[in-house]
Amino acid sequence: MSGAIELVESRALVGNPLGDPTVRRVAVWLPPSYAQAPERRYPVIYWLAGFAGTGEMLFSGNPWQPGLGDRLDRLAAEGKMGEAIVVAPDCFTRWGGAQYLDSPAHGNYETHLLDEVLPAVDARFRTVGTRDGRAIGGKSSGGFGALVLAMRHPQRFSAVASHAGDMAFELSALPDLPIAARTLRRHGGLQPFLEQFAAHEKKAGPDYTTMMVLAQAAAYSPDAARPGGVALPFDIETGEIDWVVWQRWRAWDPIEMAAAHAGALRQMKLVFLDAGTRDEHNLDLGARIFVRRLRALGVPCEHEEFDDGHRGTAYRYDVSLPKLAAALGAGPGR
Amino acid sequence: MSGAIELVESRALVGNPLGDPTVRRVAVWLPPSYAQAPERRYPVIYWLAGFAGTGEMLFSGNPWQPGLGDRLDRLAAEGKMGEAIVVAPDCFTRWGGAQYLDSPAHGNYETHLLDEVLPAVDARFRTVGTRDGRAIGGKSSGGFGALVLAMRHPQRFSAVASHAGDMAFELSALPDLPIAARTLRRHGGLQPFLEQFAAHEKKAGPDYTTMMVLAQAAAYSPDAARPGGVALPFDIETGEIDWVVWQRWRAWDPIEMAAAHAGALRQMKLVFLDAGTRDEHNLDLGARIFVRRLRALGVPCEHEEFDDGHRGTAYRYDVSLPKLAAALGAGPGR
Amino acid sequence: MSGAIELVESRALVGNPLGDPTVRRVAVWLPPSYAQAPERRYPVIYWLAGFAGTGEMLFSGNPWQPGLGDRLDRLAAEGKMGEAIVVAPDCFTRWGGAQYLDSPAHGNYETHLLDEVLPAVDARFRTVGTRDGRAIGGKSSGGFGALVLAMRHPQRFSAVASHAGDMAFELSALPDLPIAARTLRRHGGLQPFLEQFAAHEKKAGPDYTTMMVLAQAAAYSPDAARPGGVALPFDIETGEIDWVVWQRWRAWDPIEMAAAHAGALRQMKLVFLDAGTRDEHNLDLGARIFVRRLRALGVPCEHEEFDDGHRGTAYRYDVSLPKLAAALGAGPGR
Amino acid sequence: MSGAIELVESRALVGNPLGDPTVRRVAVWLPPSYAQAPERRYPVIYWLAGFAGTGEMLFSGNPWQPGLGDRLDRLAAEGKMGEAIVVAPDCFTRWGGAQYLDSPAHGNYETHLLDEVLPAVDARFRTVGTRDGRAIGGKSSGGFGALVLAMRHPQRFSAVASHAGDMAFELSALPDLPIAARTLRRHGGLQPFLEQFAAHEKKAGPDYTTMMVLAQAAAYSPDAARPGGVALPFDIETGEIDWVVWQRWRAWDPIEMAAAHAGALRQMKLVFLDAGTRDEHNLDLGARIFVRRLRALGVPCEHEEFDDGHRGTAYRYDVSLPKLAAALGAGPGR
């Protein structure tokens, strides 16, 4: 496998409130021709991990489950995908992930990615180095990150793919709130919960869901005045939804963001979405709503569905990665 | 067992749009002393079945699972409950239940219950016959019905018990909407779905959930202009929530109704709520929110929780039935 | 519905060790023509409930789930089934069921059924009254009972139907033994387990499975010298299988019984088996093994499979009941 | 992390029938003092992966789930474990694993491990190099492998640990046979099943279970005359158990092997077993039976249980690894 780990030293993350590392491990895959064509420049696909994942973890495969590097090797060997560099950054936090956004509650991951990882990649590898040569994609929280970064930074990216990206928060995130409320209450609040979570190697299902809610709160509703630096969109004692906080979450729902960022999306050479029709977080419905919104706004996009749930769907990258490479004009191996 | 079935012929239900029967089977349990004390008058507890249930079904027990009659026999024999008549009406509809409300989409079940069942019971049995001698309770949709009817008709009832009653609709009903959207879409719409549901003896889980959503739509958001006479709070194609329709549902959320009906609730001699802390529909959180709302409004209430889920919790009636009987001043057996 | 309850006073069950009632409630359904044709005699189909069930419970339906009486009414009304009486006896025990066998551990249910229920039915109703006019069928433990009674008493029955009847015990019963071992150990033995089971209205899944194992032990491996009067086919402390006791169970496996009772089965006018191909107890595989065994022995039989699990498959009676009626020569309604 | 990958070129695996690689990646962890103490020799703990795993995969951790290297680093840093080398070999096969045994159906993995990996480790690292300096352990299939290799090769190993090791096959492996039978039948036999398994990146649950059964058949009941070179212990069409083949499996059940290898086990300085009391494969019961057998044979052993299932229990290595190191006389860091 041709994946390597690049260390990127971040200034943006210095002093981040969760105490996460500032030197980050960025996984990079180079296409087969890279070594043989020393003058050639390549487009780059940024690929974002989902919640609780890192870029490096995406590359970890096994004999029965290929990692991202094995997949790219195979797609290249089969001639299914043009030559492009693939970069998987690390925006993991102690709370499981930053949703690829800056926040006083977890640190500046959007800045890190755009102003540190991108330049480092362009400096260390022979990249095209312009928006026309950059795409961004990912699954779940990674799909969310890809869409939001493409919408907010069209001068950096010209194609985007979201696999079951977080959206339609009332259908996907809201049903998790009662689980988080009960869990936090049972542990006596945010701080005791975090302590036991760190103390136990085995993470129970509701604990995992609770961390996912907390990570979203850190991204969408930071509040320096409250415990953990976040406003929770519910009351811990009763589970009652705090609609004021919830509106802050909603403002980050890609479906709500679409109208204001339609111009950016129209500049994309490809907007691709998919999801499984049994997605446990209803993200297939999210994609349907988003796509309808885009069509109403006159934004072209490609939309696919398949018969599966949310987990174990990396085989769908076989569809999106070649599309992104093609959108970037990635050339053949020789 | 001392349960009997009384037939009540309804005028309120004549011409109901779902074609449900107008002669209704009302299950009645008489306390041990009833036959021996021909002059004595008894308070009455109305007990409402949950979704997809009838009063008569509540009485159907087996050697390992007592029915409501077995339970009442035992409570009486053990001296745990004062002598009261218990009445379980039938407000089942082809869609699974009316939420005990009048609606052009399913017929007038609130009217049937108040203006037909109550007078029939008072006429046929030796009842106290006033609000002081009437309580109402139930579980799930039956708990909802009990609370809503008590709030709306304090001149009829003076005590109320809700076991895991429907409320906090964003936490309990809203997570079902995506299931209904996918199911209706897969069947090609409301009418084809209803046809296949009727045609198949075995009801699949998502089909059952979809019927539950439809029954709520019939109760909360009837709309003569739309298919099936109901406005659905979501788009069938995308699952997107229709917040306008949703507001019509919310208006029937007991938590939202509490403020306007605080006076009625204050007149109750007992307001009792419970739910299991693992309730799959989050109705334990619903009860917590409701109770906090009542306390803010100065309405006294009793609130219990227990370690269980939503189903198979009839053993909790051992707590509520004696409390209701006591609130009504039910006397001992002799 | 045309179901009635007949009381049968049993001598066979007098002094049964579990203290179960000796007066038994036998559910009887009479075909539409019965009242109008006072001279006519009818064949009888005996229908056996599964574990934890009684004949009467089979008749308990609701608007969305027909009971056995509703089903028979409909089959008759649609002209799909010849006129036959259907009788559902009660062989429930405190341990959940007798597998329709005599045993010192639970009492003499085989004798009760054959020498008390059959004569009572023949005496109280206009039945054909010979083996040619009697069939027997049922589901799960009821299917087991039907097959075993047909094999052992071909002079009484001339047709048999088994829906997912217990058999191939290594595939169906053996996987339950570890559950029972752990459960009994956790409760400190048989007696403490039985006490808590009786004390708790809500029966947990493993407790239910444990009772099922105990009921089988009572039927297959009684042992007066051991606690509860049964030899368990496993060690409570370790779960190790006791192969000596297990051989006693195996002797009652219909697959093992088939060879010795091939003559009886060959006398049947119909041997019908089915099971769902997702049966959680692997009883579809059991039926396949049994059918192959019968074919090797030259016993004709009908075998069907369908796409479903073990529970909620009463709709399959629509297939077997008319076949049994036809095998008995049941005539049309008029 | 201090894990490294050593390549071991195997002669034993040349020409293996599944076409698996002959150069094997052996993961090696060196204790903190290794580099600083150039004269010092270390005991070695061989750690075996479970089904579908490789040694290298055990080392793959993430921020929330430590890999084996992270765990060893921490145990060393906390002073909880003596200094020992830990080696995790790779005995993965296309069928998911060899159970660490030689077989004509999958190749000679026992030989590979003993005669190739052990010498290579002793040659390349400063090891004690005798049985007194070698322990073996693992989980699930790895626990099985550890016990069987310790029993068969006491001249090579002097301590052994089994976490939920495969045993009591009637309780653990037999319940999987019906799943495999149905799956193979649905695919039309062994060969079509294997083809579709290889073709689909996502492995369905029953397919995974079927592979586990096939891997065991390759290890326990090879048969050159049958498809795939294995005798299956069941009939594919009916699921009927083939007791002749099953006896071949049983011969490899550690519980059955214990008596004949009691002498070897008595030579161990430590025999440690544990399992979770909710182990889905009943391996807690297996361990109880095994331990009772050992005690009857006068073999000392340590036995623990904990409240968990089969998966996600690597935190238990915190108990076993220090015990094994201590049994080998592993010294402190300095």
Image: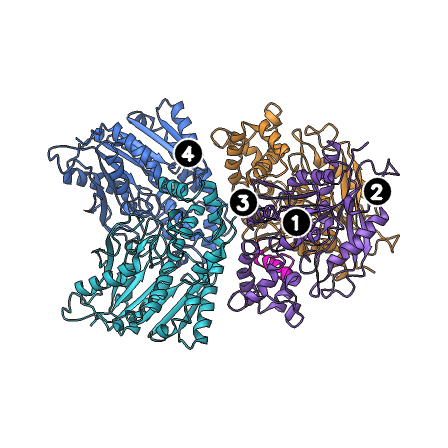
Chain colours: A blue, B orange, C purple, D cyan
Q: Both on one chain, marks 1 and 2?
A: no
Q: Is residue D119 above or below residue A39?
A: below
User: In the rendered image, is residue D298 in sight?
Assistant: yes
The residue pinned by badge 3 equals C278
Indicate which disc residue B123 carries: 2
The amino acid beneath tag 1 is Gly
Q: Chain of mark 2?
A: B
Mark pair 4, 2: CA separation: 61 Å
SS at circle 4: strand
Mark 3 vs mark 2, foreground winner is 3
Mark 4 in CB contact with mark 2 (< 8 angstroms): no
Left or right: residue B152 compared with residue B83: left
Indicate which disc residue C143 carries: 1
Left or right: residue A235 compared with residue C162: left
The amino acid beneath tag 4 is Phe
SS at circle 3: loop
Mark 3 in CB contact with mark 4 (< 8 angstroms): no
Mark 3 vs mark 1, foreground winner is 1
Mark 4 in CB contact with mark 1 (< 8 angstroms): no
User: In the rendered image, is residue A236 in sight?
Assistant: no
Which stretch is magenta? Answer: C200-216
Mark positioned earlier in the residue sequence (3 or 1): 1
